[in-house]
Image (cartoon, helix red, strand yellow):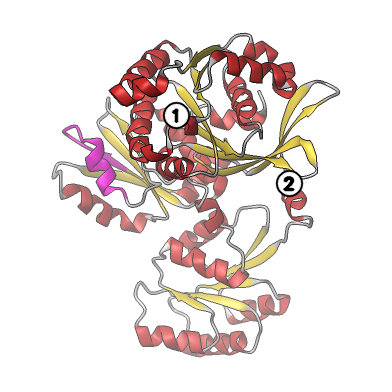
Amino acid sequence: MNNYFKNYQSLSSILISGERQCGKLTFALYFASQLTKKPITIISPYSQDVFNKKRQENAWLSSNLQPVLEDIDTFHFRKSWKALKKRYGYGFLIKDIEKIISKADEFIIFHRLDKFFEIDETNEIENFLFNVLTIVQAEEKKIIFTFKAGDSRSRYMRDYFDKNIDSKFVISKRPYDNKIRDVEMASSLFSIKHSSFSFELDEGTNKLIFAPRSQEEDNGNEIKTYQIVLASRSSELIGITKYLFGIDNFELKLVDSTLPEMIKVINDAPQLIIFNPLEQQSVTELKKISKVVSSSNIKVIFISSRHVIRRHDKAEILRSGFCDVHERNLYIEDFVLSVERALGQSFYSSEMKKVPNKTFVIYDKKTFSRLLVSFLCKHLFFTVFKFKYQSILSEDDIRKNLGRPFDAAFINKSEKVIYLLLVNTSAVNADAIEAKFLAFDPKVQIIGFKEAAKYSLDFQKK
């Protein structure tokens, strides 16, 4: 198995979109073959004759995936499909699909999903896809959808998939080189370091190669490295910054928040300094530090040692030369946004955009663990809150009380415990999180929490 695909063993749904004849089915078959050795089931809107002709004519596909193609099960629309659909609606198709999925070994490919619908049937799309995904989850199978991008049907599908799919890929022909396909990971639950890939047939070995493209290849230049200095004694702030900036293009240096140290690091001219004064630091020393900051061209973010900063105090700090101010109990999103603005680089926001816009309710510990690893690999901040409950909570109740669409809940029914993974939320919010759940179930009790920085340390020790 390609090492990249090990991160995708727990997913249940994939979307592959692209223009006509760009290799959507080839990539879908290759993807599925990397995750299973069992026969693959394909549901196609093409007739069997047309499908077989396309397969035979496509040498790139058939020559390299012949063992897979010889062992697939294919299901095709009847010639009377449109008349049946008009007479019975999509209900009869869902029943047939349920039978196919239940008998499939592990992987089902819905090829050219856009051809399942007419232009005037956009209202049917959401209900149809909801039913298909529900069946797949109930049968514990995996599904890949392919569709041709560009028309109104695709737009409606894409809007639905944005909130209900684990991983989305876009495949395209490379200009001036018809033998190579470029694959972009638009979003993914189980993503790793790379999001851009090349997909091609090695004529020497007659094997398909799926490999990440480096950032240097994408941009034509080297990765820029940013020097960041944290001037603080706060173990909590040190842990957060080590976690957030523990990626390749950051160099984080830790120093004390005294005047001599600030003078020294400003002279070193890093791209950014995060200054967190001591609680007992004198007003005189703070004024001297502010004077040094204002006379330099270095961007410095001020993190107060206080839980609350009055408005006029914040204005005074900004006037003294600091580029932004935050209270001691950081709002992670606001803090990261300050850093991105200071550096002119959306290192965090770009990763957040790749997270599927869905709320995950998970009943399998292995899948939840992979979700945690996915966020750790992206260095996205989160806290897992552990709750003990008495009565069974509905998925709707849980979803209503999760903070954002990409939060997650792992329900351990045997232990009557819920683990809530809340993105961009720190442990200081524990009381507020508990209050939300107590509002609809007074017997729910929070019994622990753990922030991403601690998970990261444990993960590194393994």
Q: Which class describes the residues within 10 Å of circle 2: few (<14), some (14-19), or many (20+)?
A: some
Residue at 41% across, 69% down: 328
User: Considering the numbered disc 1 on the image, is that residue within a helix, a strand or a loop?
Assistant: helix
Residue at 38% across, 25% down: 137
Q: How many marks?
A: 2
Alpha-carbon span between mark 1 and mark 2: 37 Å
Q: Is residue 218 magenta?
A: no
Instruction: Say which amino acid is labelled 1.
Output: Phe
- 310, above or below 91, in the image: below
Quadrant of the frame with the N terminus? top right
Which of these two is toward me, 386 or 366?
Answer: 366
Q: Quadrant of residue 56?
A: top right
User: Is 57 situated left or right of 299 in this image?
Assistant: right
Q: Of callouts 1 and 2, which one flags the residue occurring earlier in the amino acid sequence? A: 1
* Range shown magenta: 386-402
Which of these two is toward me, 242 or 95?
Answer: 95
Q: Which residue is mark 1?
A: 116
Which of these two is toward me, 229 or 197?
Answer: 197
Instruction: Say which amino acid is labelled 2.
Output: Ser
Quadrant of the frame with the C terminus? top right
Evaluate whether residue 240 shows in this view.
yes
Q: Which class describes the residues within 10 Å of circle 1: few (<14), some (14-19), or many (20+)?
A: some
- 383, above or below 191, in the image: below
Q: Quadrant of residue 461?
A: top right
User: Considering the numbered disc 2 on the image, is that residue within a helix, a strand or a loop?
Assistant: loop
Q: Which residue is mark 2?
A: 214
Residue at 38% across, 32% down: 129
Residue 342 in the image: state x and y as whole percent: 58, 72
User: Is 408 situated left or right of 214 in this image?
Assistant: left
User: Is 56 situated left or right of 431 in this image?
Assistant: right
